[in-house]
Structure formats: structure tokens, C-alpha cells
Image (cartoon, rainbow, N blue to C red):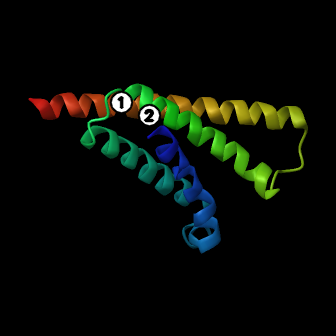
Amino acid sequence: MALGLGSLALLFPLAELTGLREALRPAPTVVLLFGVVIATWIGVVAVGRVPRPVLTLTLAGAVFGVVLVALPVTLRTLPDVDGRLLVLGAVLEIARSVVLGALAGLLAAALRRRSRR
């Protein structure tokens, strides 16, 4: 489950390939895609009655972050900056994604508890 949800990071290069990023501009595209990803995570976990929503989405966030970091390496689109900055950026991206996943998991768990009442 976490691998599938984390792989939604592939929406970002898809948006680039389809021209969505240029059509909407970069910042709105990122906001839109993050909204879609978070809503999908919460919906799938809350409605799907996943046993451990916080753990599942925390792991999904980790996968998401790793995919986001690996994509520029794989596609050879890394900016020309110092390697230490790239490592720092990678660590921060993965940490941010893990935190977002955990927060989404808490929200999904709260929604599920509320729907049981």
C-alpha cells in the first residue's frame, strides 16, 4: 500500500511531459499535485480501512520523498550545484515528505474514527 501511494510522486514528471506544468505555471502545478496526492492518500486510507493509517502514510511519504529525490538523478536533470547541497536538499525533501505523510495519516485516522460514530 505504501509503495503504491508513494509512487504518486510520478505525477510530477507526468505533469511536465504532458505540458500541464507550463499551462498552469510551476507553482500552481505543484500545489495542485500535492493536493491531489494528499487527498488520494487520505481518501484511500480512510475509506479503505487500512489497519495502521499513520504508519502507512508515513511510509508512503518516505517512498514519495525517495522517488522525488531519485527522479532528477535518474532523468539526469540535476542542477549544477555543490554535492553537499544536493545531499542536504535530498534529506530535507525526504523528511518533509515523511512529515506530510504522518500528518495525512493522522487526518485519515481522525476521519475514520469520526465516520464510525
- Residue nearer the viewer, 103 or 71: 71
* Residue 56 placement (x, y as % from top left): 43, 31
Q: In which quarter of the image is the N terminus?
A: top left
Residue identifier under label 2 = 57
Locate residue 96 relative to residue 80 in the image: left or right: left
Towards the viewer: 44 or 17: 44
Residue 104 quadrant: top left
In the rendering, which numbered label is found on residue 37?
A: none
Q: Residue at x 37, y 47 (%)?
A: 39
Res. 30 image quadrant: bottom right
Badge 2 crowding class, 10 Å Cα cut-off, few under 14, some 14 to 19, many 20 or more, is many
Instruction: Estimate the spatial distance between the alpha carbons at disc 2 and disc 1, rounded to whole Å.
Output: 6 Å
From the viewer's perspective, tell me whether residue 78 is left or right of residue 4: right
Tell me the SS state at disc 2: helix
- Image coordinates for residue 108, horizontal then vertical, percent: 31, 34
> Residue 95: x percent and y percent?
61, 29
Q: Can you identify the residue that label 1 sits on?
A: 53
Count of numbered marks = 2
Q: Position of residue 49 (x, y in %)?
A: 26, 36
* 48 versus 87 height, above or below: below
Point out the image quarter for the C terminus.
top left
- Mark 2 touches mark 1? (CB < 8 Å): yes
Q: Image point 12% across, 31% down: which residue?
A: 116
